[in-house]
Image (cartoon, grey):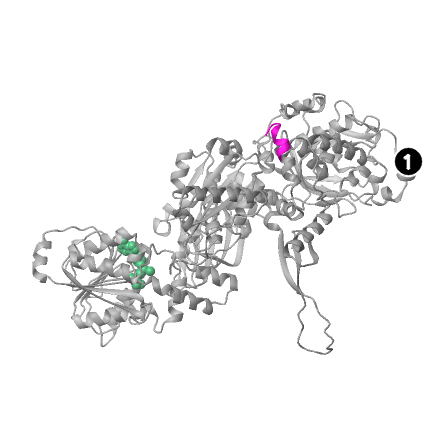
Amino acid sequence: MENGGLSVVAVRKMKLTPKAIIVQKFGRNAQFTVDEVQDVVQNGCPGLAIPQKGPCLYRCSLQLPEFSVVSETFKKKKDAEQSAAEKALEKLGIDPSPNVPSAEEAWDKLIASVKHLFSNEFLSSQSPLRGHFIAALRRDGDLYGSVPASVIAVCDSKLANLCKLINPKVESSHLLVLTYIMRAATRLSEFVVTSEGQLSIWRKDPYPPEIKESSIIQQSESPDSICIEAIHIPSSLEMAVHPVTLNVSSTGYYLDVIARNLDQTDGNKILVSRTIGKASSEMRLYFAAPKSYLLDLSSDLPNVEEVVDFEGSLNPRASYLYGQDIYGDAILASIGYTRKSEGLFHEDITLQSYYRMLIHLTPSGVYKLSREAILTAELPMAFTTRTNWRGSFPREMLFMFCRQHWLSEPVFSTCSNSLKESSESSRFYEKSAALESAETGKECTSGGGTAASDNVRCEVKIFSKSRDPILECSPKEFYKKQNESIENASLKVLSWLNAYFKDPDIPLEKLNNLVGALDIQCYPQNFFKKFSSYRFIHNVQQRKMGEKLLQANSINTLNAIPEHGIYCLSIGGPDSGIYPSNGCLSFISYSVSLVIEGETMKELLESREEFEFEMGTGAVIPQVEVVTAQMSVGQSACFCKELPPQELILAAADDSARTFSLLSSRACCLEYHITLLRVTEPPEDRMEQALFSPPLSKQRVEYALQHIKESCATTLVDFGCGSGSLLDSLLDYPTALEKIVGVDISQKSLSRAAKIIHSKLSKKLDAAVPCTDVKSAVLFDGSITVFDSRLHGFDIGTCLEVIEHMEEDEASQFGNIVLSSFCPRILIVSTPNYEYNAILQKSSSTIQEDDPDEKTQLQSCKFRNHDHKFEWTRDQFNCWATELAARHNYSVEFSGVGGSGDREPGFASQIAVFRSRSPPEEDDLLKDGDSAHHYKVIWEWDGNGLSRSSL
Ligand code: SAH
Ligand code: MG
């Protein structure tokens, strides 16, 4: 990109259409909407109520962040779009003329533009710089009429764009613009003056008296002095970032005020950053120009880059915030002259907003802020469905991340299944097409992909501004919709970046292990060149551990879950029996306070009346998720946890300065209060309940019950019993069952099952006529792919809707072990029938009252539940079961519940019933000696009302 880059840039720019310029500038923030317009035709029939069709015309409306425009009508959609873009460019003051100058022409233009700034006419222009020129005329003494070159460099984007054409490096090194402006001024020695050691320019001949006295200059004076809150960012990390007040008098120039706050005599010695934060903001960083920089402007143009290597000490926090190097102390202020406002525009910047900007630079920070839940929300680990996602979408966040860190826009390339299976070269074509289209800001649309099947895969690449590769992500997963594949890939990149930002000292290999299957390839050299400075900032945000405080208050470990960092946990309120499970949305109200050692008063930091999140995706901090999972609807919980990084607390705190002093002087911890307001059912249950009566789960239980009765079974084991829905229901019916056992790997589910079964059995014990003969009930914690001899030789085994929660090879393993080692006389296995999903999903979209976009999203959900690892068609299930039965001397019959076995596409839930062909005694003898106890008893009922629990 040294010299050759110049012509490339110029050539490419020459071809841009107005629309391409808009798209390049605004990306996804530019929305083109084309509408059909019907010309009303006069057909000589007044009063006719039926509209007569004229030729079809198109009109385009273009929505930009600041304003919108509407085109005239055109016969072609394309023309309407270009016309709207043209109008927008006009409004933005961007010259769409295709003759973008060469480097030399740009240089001449720059000189002419600088000259124009010092003309009489300029004082009545619309430029934001005009305010500075007028303010310069109010400066005292030697400073009278002198305009700091640094504001010229940053307040007029046209000048910066010309500099970019002269040297593309300007893009990543803001100070170069200033150098070019100064250089242009020295070429204009007939009109303007600059002097050694001064970063300012002034007119050689004074403005004529009529201008000096004209209303333009007099009017703009604001009558009173103003106080503006700004932030001082010391270059030394030892010193805290603190608020400062800028007192700008009515006759003074604000840059001089900022300069004095930075121990400089006047604003001519100050450098100014481009705006940071929102596009429309006037928020900038101000910092002193190093002395060597002031003196050395004489070197020739080719060496201009060297000028920026100066001696001052790097300001890590300011540099990080800005994304480019800043030296010495800095002030962050929102003040300046804008195109729109007549006088001086200004806003206060609080410490809180500084910290919010800081965390906004990390992926989880963006997410937290988008949810307005800094201490509670967390970047989710999974994008399950659009319907369940809350807050900014991954793709949107990735774009923002790249913009904020001065990276190129992310490049997405989607490819469809068919293309993947064909030659590698066609995939290559796809990729390069995506790269091309990235230049115009659009993403690549896959050529052959149809929306009908699951065949879109998406790769993302992140490049620096100079196109050095930084990261790429190539997920293996395919999705039905392109959109979904893009969101998922974006989230992977964000998750990887987030892991880095949480611990920037982490070695790369460890980082990759930690974040697991994110399919990321990182280019370490480029990556660390870009991001390693973040280490300094992160390290200085020392946590003040409140561990002692936490432990002192946690009297025993019963009310703490130390492995999750949860202390002093209490859950109160009656158990409603309705628990959130993975995949459902939990609605909570919560508050977070800072608890300070030795004080009874707590500082409220964050609270929400209603906040919803998807369970099981890590959309909130782990402590909130763990605790919520243990609560039933209506219950409240309170717990304490250790402090998160300081910047998060300060971003949440209203009075950051006070909170900061508390944090640095006392031991503190955070206290959370949560109330679980309600939960939505996960989609699977929602669909099943809405479509089947009785609900599918009930039908499965009834199906099992029928076999239990018919077989006169006295012992039953439920493999993967979950929360005990089957075991619980069985207790309501008269059967021959005496002993029931459940196994599951989820402790959470088992503890729920224990509660439910316990209360049912206790009630039965009290009841005059118990309808069940069950004397013994046991719950085991263990995997059903592992044998435990205590469960050998039961009369009946059930395994309802479990195998699809395992990987396919584990399901086969379970099949072999259950029939070869557990050897129940009868085994009932149910699993979803994949072919039935089309019906479920079609109907669910009519049940759902979400907007139409979300309906289609729901349809694109592959399986009924995102925890499912597979869902089989009838053929697949039949194959699996038939083979299995044959191998272990069982017979097998197929059936199901929901829908009908005779009609397509079969039952909603398919069931296989296996029956042992070997006489039971034989087996018993064989297995009795084998006393493998691999399961842990979680809860046990001995028939006399005594129960033992190890939970
Ligand atoms: N049978 C229950 C629960 C079905 S949900 C019902 O019909 O309501 C699936 C259950 O399988 C979950 O509780 C999950 O924890 C359990 N599971 C998944 N893999 C398992 C394994 N390897 N061993 C034991 N249980 C498992
Ligand atoms: Mg299931």
Residue 749 versus residue 409 in the image, above or below: below
Q: Which residue is mark 1?
A: 208
Density class for disc 1 (Cα within 10 Å; few <14, some 14-19, many ≥20) is: few
Image coords of residue 800 (percent x, y): 27, 62
Towards the viewer: 358 or 351: 358
User: Is residue 875 toward the left or the right of residue 545 in the image?
Assistant: left
Residue 532 visible in rendering: yes
Q: Amino acid at mark 1?
A: Pro
Secondary structure mostly seen in magenta is: helix
User: Which residue appears at 38% of the width and 65% of the height?
Assistant: 685
Ligand 2's quadrant is bottom left
Image coords of residue 830 (percent x, y): 27, 63
Towards the viewer: 227 or 780: 780
Residue 643 visible in rendering: no
User: Is residue 257 toward the left or the right of residue 591 in the image?
Assistant: right
Quarter occupied by residue 822: bottom left
User: Is residue 525 toward the left or the right of residue 37 in the image?
Assistant: left
User: Which residue appears at 68% of the width and 28% of the height?
Assistant: 289
* Segment tinted magenta in the rendering: 1-8
Towards the viewer: 590 or 109: 109
Towards the viewer: 889 or 493: 889
Q: Secondary structure at mark 1?
A: loop
Image coords of residue 394 (percent x, y): 50, 49
Quadrant for the N terminus in the image: top right
Quadrant for the C terminus in the image: bottom left
User: Is residue 732 toward the left or the right of residue 846 in the image?
Assistant: left
Residue 297 versus residue 617 in the image, above or below: above
